[in-house]
């Protein structure tokens, strides 16, 4: 039931934004897991993050993991799972830039939010094009990374999306 409600809420939010006078930047997996949407809101850039299957399925790490990292990953997961399934952060529009239809950056957020009693300071969000080239060919994805300070600890949440599922929506 929660999955249906969260998908419905995200579709409702996304559809209301798409009728405005601006384009929307949206990244969503085919079967929704973690979605990220950027939209202009006056002189602010709103960044919405929805964890459709619940916070326990959100991405908590990007990169190489060794057995030595398990304690750190467990601590990070414990901190991140205190947050709700839906987040809304804003950056001043002048702090954001679209470099092309898929690559954007917003840095220098100064706002501190309280989510589920946890202080969250989002200080950056950006996307990057990731290319994996092998004997089988070339495959590109778009990775969106959100840099947060949660109760005084730096955290990075990154998620990869297929190129067709991430970028400016006309």
Image (cartoon, rainbow, N blue to C red):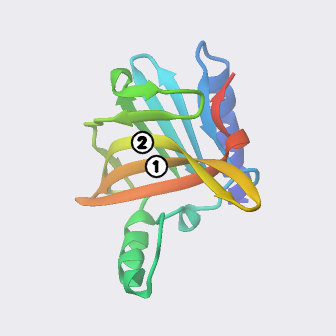
Give the answer, above or below, for where 70 lies relative to 131.
below
Could you tell me how far apart the alpha carbons at marks 1 and 2 are, in whole angstroms? 6 Å
Residue 2 is situated, as x and y percent measured from the top left of the image, at 68, 58
Q: Residue furthest front?
A: 135
Q: Is residue 143 visible?
A: yes
Q: Which residue is mark 1?
A: 145
Residue 34 in the figure: left or right of residue 158 = right
Residue 63 in the figure: left or right of residue 110 = right
Q: Quadrant of the C terminus?
A: top right
Name which residue lies at 22% across and 59% down. 152
Residue 74 is situated, as x and y percent measured from the top left of the image, at 41, 78
Q: Residue furthest bottom?
A: 67
Residue 51 is situated, as x and y percent measured from the top left of the image, at 58, 55
Residue 106 is situated, as x and y percent measured from the top left of the image, at 39, 34
Name which residue lies at 45% across and 66% down. 81
Q: Which residue is mark 2?
A: 125
Give the answer, above or below, for where 121 lies relative to 24.
below
Residue 134 in the figure: left or right of residue 88 = right
- Image marks 1 and 2: residues in contact by CB distance under 8 Å: yes
| Picture quadrant of residue 110 | top left
**Label 1 Cα crowd, 10 Å radius (few <14 / some 14-19 / many 20+):** some
Mark 2, secondary structure of its residue: strand
Q: Quadrant of the N terminus?
A: bottom right
**Label 2 Cα crowd, 10 Å radius (few <14 / some 14-19 / many 20+):** many
| Picture quadrant of residue 9 | top right
Give the answer, above or below, for where 10 lies relative to 53.
above
Q: Is residue 84 visible?
A: no
Name which residue lies at 63% across and 56% down. 132
Mark closest to the chain's N terminus, 1 or 2? 2
Q: Residue furthest left?
A: 152
Front residue of this view, candidates 161 and 42: 161
Mark 1, secondary structure of its residue: strand
């Amino acid at each position: 039931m929660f999955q249906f409600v969260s998908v419905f809420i995200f579709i409702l939010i996304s559809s209301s934004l798409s009728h405005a006078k601006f384009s929307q930047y949206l990244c969503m997996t085919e079967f929704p897991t973690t979605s990220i949407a950027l939209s202009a809101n006056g002189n602010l850039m709103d960044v919405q993050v929805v964890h459709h299957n619940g916070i326990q399925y959100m991405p908590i790490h990007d990169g190489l993991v060794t057995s030595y990292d398990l304690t750190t990953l467990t601590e990070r997961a414990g901190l991140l799972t205190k947050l709700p399934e839906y987040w809304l952060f804003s950056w001043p529009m002048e702090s954001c830039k679209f470099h092309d239809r898929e690559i954007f950056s917003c840095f220098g957020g100064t706002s501190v939010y309280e989510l589920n009693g946890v202080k969250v300071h989002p200080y950056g969000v950006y996307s990057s094009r990731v290319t994996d080239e092998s004997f089988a060919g070339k495959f590109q994805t778009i990775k969106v990374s959100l840099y947060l300070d949660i109760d005084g600890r730096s955290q990075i949440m990154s998620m990869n999306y297929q190129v067709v599922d991430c970028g400016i929506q006309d």
